[in-house]
Amino acid sequence: MEFWVHVLNTVLIFTMLGLSLNLVLGFSGLASMAHAAFFGLGAYSAALLSSRLGWPFPIDLAAAMLITAVAAAVAALPALRVRGEYVILLTLALQMLAYGLMLSWVELTGGRTGLPGIPRPVFFGWKLVTPLDFLPLTAISAALTFLVCQRIANSPYGRVLKALREDETATLALGKNVVGFRVSIFAVSGGLAAAAGALFAHYHAFINPFSFSLDQSIFLIAIVTLGGTGNLLGTVVGASLFVGIPELLRFLHLQQDIVAPFRNLIFGLMLVAFMRFRPQGIIPEYSGLGRKGRAAGSRVSPLGNLVRAGGKNLVAMGLSKRFGGIQAVKGVDLELHPGEVVALVGPNGAGKTTIFNLLTGFLKPDSGRVYLNGEDISALPAWQRARRGLVRTFQDVRIFQRMTVLDNVLVAIPEQCGESLFNLFFRPKRVATDEVEARLLALNYLEFVGLKAETNVLAESLSYGEQKLLALARAMAVGPAVVLLDEPTAGLDPQWVTRLLELVGRLRATGCAIGLVEHNLEVLRAVADRAYFLEAGQVVAAGRPDELIKDPRLSEIYFGL
Amino acid sequence: MAGEPRLNVTNLVAGYGRKQVVFDLSLKVGAGEIVALIGHNGAGKTTALKSIFGLLPAWSGAVYFEGKAITNSTPAANVRRGIAFIPQERAVFPDLAVEENLDLGAITVTDPEVRRRRLKEVFELFPVLRERRRQRAGTLSGGEQRMVSLGIALMVRPRLLLIDEPSLGLAPVLVQRIMDTVQGICREQGASVLLVEQNVRQALRVADRAYVMRAGRILLEESGPSLLARGQWWDLF
C-alpha cells in the first residue's frame, strides 16, 4: 500500500515537471534541455534554505520558485537571439553547467554525497513523514500546477506563445514583443519546475545531483512528447505511464542487478513504439477538432467599425541593400499617403519584397531612412513598427498552421488585456470581457473575408487561396494605418480577386495607406492610384498604371503584349 | 483522343485527414493534350492533383496512366513512369545552387549531352536563372524560386506534367512565356499536361479542354476555346 502511494507521489511530482516543460516545449516550441537543471535548482534552494537557514516549508518553496524563475529568465536571454537547434545546444550547455556545479560545489551542495536531513514540512504541528502524509500536498500542488498551466495555455498570452512557435517572423509582424513572451514563459516554467523540486527535496529528505542530470531532462522531454506536446492532459497521462509502468517491474521478482537495464529496455521499446504508431502523442494537441465551426450567431458590424486607425504617411529615402555580391535595392525613394493605393511592379527579383522588408524592419538597410508620419522609424524593430500601424502581409502567407482559423485572427488584435500574465491571474474579469470583445471582432474580420464557416478548423487544412484571405483578415486585425500587401491576389480565384479589390477599396476609404506588390494587371489597373516600376533594385519609372503599361520598353521586359 | 488516354481518372475520392475534399472526380487527358482544371479557391483542384500523383492517398476510385493502374503508387514510382508534378509552393532545395537544383530534375537522365541541352533550354526560358546559376536557390526572390521549380520539372521531360498554378507570383510576360512553353512541349514532344490555374484567361488560351470544378466535383467539361469564348466564365465559379 505504502509503495503504491509512493509511486503516486512520484507520478504527481513528474506530472508537475512535465506540465511546466510543456509550456516551453509544447506551447512555445522551444526545446529546452535544461529542465532538470531548473528542477534541481528548486530542490537545492529549498533544501538549503530549510536545513541551513531554517526557513519553514511553504516559504522556502516560494523562495525556491522565485530564485529559479529569475535564473530561468536570465538563462532564456541568450536563447532569444537563436532558433531551433541552437536553443537545444544552449540549454544543453546550461544543463551541463548546472549539473557540474551540483557535483563540484561541495561545501554548498555536498557534491556526490548529496544533502541529507532535509527537514520534513510541518503544517500546524502536523509533520509530514510517510508517503501517505505527503499525498494531499503533492496532489494539491499538481492540481494547482495543472490549473495554472491551463490558464496560461488557453489565454491570449498562450495564443501568442503558439503563434511564436508556428512562425516568429509573422508574430513580429503582428506587433508582438517576442522577447518579453519568451523570457516570461521561461520564468514561469522554471518557477513551476522549482516547486516540483522543492516538494521532491522535502519528500525524500535527501537529494543528490543524480536526480537532476541530462538523462532526467531527456526523460521529461519524452514524457511531454509522448503524452502529446501542446496538450496538458497528455502530459498527465504521459507522466503516469512512464513513471508508473517501470515500477510494476518490481513485481516480476527479477534479480536486482538486471532490474535497471530491463527498465531501460522497456522504456526504450515504448519510445520506439510510440514514435512509430502515434508520433503526435497519446493525446494530440487538437484532438476532437476539425468539425466545421459552430454557427456563432454574433452580430456583424460593418467594416467601418473594424478599421480602427486612421491613415499615416510612409516615406522612404535613399534605401539601399546589398546581399553579398548582389545590389538588391539601390537608392530607392518612395512615398505612400493616406487613402492611396501604390503598387510596386517589376520583373521577378527586382527587389520589391526586399523593399517591403526594409520598410517594415525585417531587414536593416545599408543606408537610407524610413519615416512614418514624420517620425524616423529607421531604428525601430519590426514589432514596434507594427504597433505604430505599419502592417504587412507575406508572399508566402505565413499563417499559423497549427492554430485554428479564429485564433489566427484573434492573436493579431493588439493590446489584449490577457496578454499580460499579471492580468491573467489578478484581473480575470477584465480579461474575460476583453476576450469576448476580441472574439466578436475577430469573427467580424473572418466574416468579411468569407471564412466564418471555417472558424474552428485548423488553418493548415485551408486551401491556399483561403490561407491568403486569412492572412488578410489577420493583417486587418492589427489595425493598420499603412498596410503593405505582398502579392495578395496570387493564387486567388477571380471571384475572390473581386472581393479583395472591394476590400482594398474600403480600406482606402477609411484613410489607410496601401502598398501593393502585384503581378495581376487587371488588379493593378483597377485599384492602384500610382505605381513605381522597379528594375534591378532601382525605381526606373513611376506614374499611373495605365501609363506604365503603355510604355513600350516596360511592356517588353515585364507587362507582355 | 484516339486509343488509350495518357491519364484516366475515374471516380476519385480524396481528402485531408477526415475532411473529404474531392468527390467522385473523373477526368481524362489524351496524348499531347493540354487540359485545364479550373475552379474557385478550395474547390479541390490541388487535392486532386496531389492524389493523382500519389502525394495524398486516394480514398477510392482509380488512376490510370497509359492504361496501367497507378492508383496510390508512390511519387517516386510515378516520376520513373514519366510523370512530373510542379507544386504550388516554392519547391526548391534552398541550400543548393540554382544549377544543382536543375540538375536534380534531370536525375533520371543518364546522357550528359541531353542534360546540357535541357539546361540550356531552361536558361533560354528564364534568362535570369542563367545569371544566378551559382547562387543558392534559397536566396532568390519568390518569383525566381518559382522559375527554378518549374525548371526542375522541365528537366524531367515528362510524358505527363501536372502543374499547380504556374503563374503564381510571376511577371505577366513570364506567364505568357511559360504557357507558350507548355504548349510547345505538348505540340513538339507529345507530352500531356494537366494544368491547375487561377489565371483562367491565360490557361484557356493554351488549353485544348477544360474542366470546371466546384466543391470537389466536376461541374462542366468544355473545349478551351469555347469556354474562353463564353466570356462570362466567372459566373461558373
Image: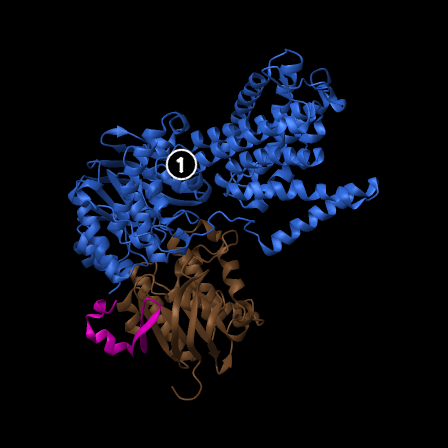
Chain colours: A blue, B brown
Q: Quadrant of the N terminus of chain A?
A: top right
Foreground residue among A396 and A288: A288
In which image quadrant can residue A51 be found? top right
In which image quadrant can residue B24 be found? bottom left
In which image quadrant can residue B127 be found? bottom left
Residue at point 61%, 24% (across, down): A198
Q: Position of residue B70 (x, y in %)?
A: 51, 76
Q: Where is residue A458 in the image (x, y as percent from the top left)?
A: 40, 51
Q: Is residue A6 left or right of residue A182?
A: right
Query: What is the chain letter for disc 1?
Result: A
Q: Mark 1 points at which residue?
A: A155
Task: Say if residue A346 shows up in the picture.
Answer: no
In magenta segment, residue A307: no
Q: In this view, does A533 lie to the left or right of A7?
A: left
Badge 1 amino acid: Ser
Segment tinted magenta in the rendering: B208-237
Foreground residue among A161 and B169: A161
Q: Is residue B111 left or right of residue A440?
A: right
Q: Where is residue A261 in the image (x, y as percent from the top left)?
A: 78, 44
Vertical placement of residue B152 versus A316, above or below: below
Vertical placement of residue A101 versus A262, above or below: above
Q: Position of residue B62 (x, y in %)?
A: 47, 76
